Image (spheres, rainbow, N blue to C red):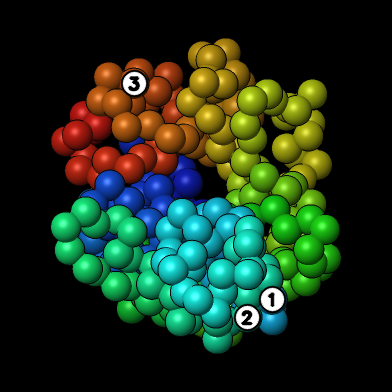
């Protein structure tokens, strides 16, 4: 099955940043623990200083790494991901922050690592390209991600999404076989259907607070896949699926937890 075919289905669960309720987010162990508990995995991707695609949600490293504990890096505040080379990023621990009573070091996850993992395990992956406007050009950001997908031959297994919609146009031009999704928070763009058609996206993912039945119905009738983030409540998940939402992005991965068995 291709990701495009998956988008025709409903009742889907996406592992938000991997199994982040039971493992450090956006790490290989989070991807491994997502297997069998979701329909696809969502990760966040941005570029290191030397242009390598790495899997990190925050613009800065302090929340999910031990960067502040490394003497050599203490003068590097605010510890922006884009200010560190790939070799420097590889020296950090991406796991121990998550655990209270044990030391669980986890290595950096690169996009290449993640793509190799999904290929080996035949699971789908939503790659959210973080907004890097002002750091690298749109062309460089998208080309780096697309190159990794092409080289790993995983274009049938991936969905590319972003809050920076300029990336989506470029991604569709460079990799027309891979579906794209516009991410939105807070308010819908004006003339929503016209806007999404102009972007040539296949999906539209927006925050839970923005949901209303009329918009869901309009989007689904127009042929767009609809995803809602971040939903960890059983009752709310059932409500969204009954409205026609295709997918929820959740930190709670057991399907019985969200009532869709």
Pinpoint residue 57: horizontal percent, then vertical percent: 52, 55
Q: Which quarter of the figure has residue 255?
A: top left
Residue 118 is marked as none
**Mark 3 highlights which residue?**
236
Q: Which residue is labeled 2 in the image?
A: 85
**Residue in the image at 73% along x and 73% along y:** 143
In the image, residue 4 sits, relative to residue 73, either above or below, namely above
| Residue 139 appears in the figure | yes
Compared with 164, 221 (above or below) is above
Gap between marks 3 and 1 measured at Cα = 40 Å
**217 sits left or right of 105 in the view:** right
| Mark 1 lies on residue | 49
For the residues marked 3 and 2, what is the alpha-carbon distance in whole angstroms? 41 Å
Circle 3 sits in a helix, a strand or a loop, which is it?
helix
Q: Position of residue 47 (x, y in %)?
A: 65, 70
Question: Quadrant location of the N terminus?
Answer: bottom left
**Residue found 36% across the figure and 40% down from its top:** 250
Q: Are marks 1 and 2 in contact (CB under 8 Å)?
A: yes
For residue 155, what is the image quadrant?
A: bottom right
Residue 169 lies, in percent from the top left, at 77, 54
Q: Is residue 151 above or below residue 187?
A: below
Reading the chain from its start, which is encountered first: label 3 or label 2?
2
What percent of the width, then of the height, locates residue 50? 69, 81
Looking at marks 1 and 2 on the same chain, the residue that comes earlier in the sequence is marked by 1
């Amino acid at each position: 099955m291709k990701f495009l075919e998956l988008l025709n289905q409903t009742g889907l669960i996406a592992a938000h940043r991997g199994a982040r309720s039971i493992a450090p987010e956006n790490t290989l162990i989070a991807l491994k623990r997502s297997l069998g508990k979701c329909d696809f995995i969502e990760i966040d991707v941005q570029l290191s200083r030397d242009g390598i695609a790495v899997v990190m949600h925050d613009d800065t490293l302090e929340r999910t790494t031990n960067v502040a504990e490394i003497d050599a890096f203490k003068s590097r505040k605010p510890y922006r991901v884009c200010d560190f080379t790939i070799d420097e990023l590889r020296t950090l621990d991406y796991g121990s922050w998550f655990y209270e009573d044990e030391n669980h070091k986890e290595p950096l996850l690169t996009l290449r690592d993640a793509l190799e993992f999904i290929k080996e395990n035949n699971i789908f992956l939503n790659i959210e390209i973080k907004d890097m406007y002002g750091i690298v050009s749109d062309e460089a950001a998208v080309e780096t991600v697309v190159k990794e997908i092409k080289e790993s031959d995983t274009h049938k297994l991936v969905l590319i999404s972003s809050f920076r919609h300029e990336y989506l146009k470029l991604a569709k031009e460079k990799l027309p076989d891979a579906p794209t999704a516009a991410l939105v928070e807070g308010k819908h763009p004006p003339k929503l259907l016209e806007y999404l058609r102009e972007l040539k996206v296949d999906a539209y993912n927006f925050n839970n607070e923005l949901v209303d039945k009329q918009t869901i119905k309009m989007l689904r009738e127009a042929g767009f896949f609809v995803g809602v983030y971040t939903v960890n409540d059983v009752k709310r998940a059932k409500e969204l699926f009954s409205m026609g939402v295709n997918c929820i992005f959740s930190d709670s991965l057991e399907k019985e937890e969200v009532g869709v068995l």
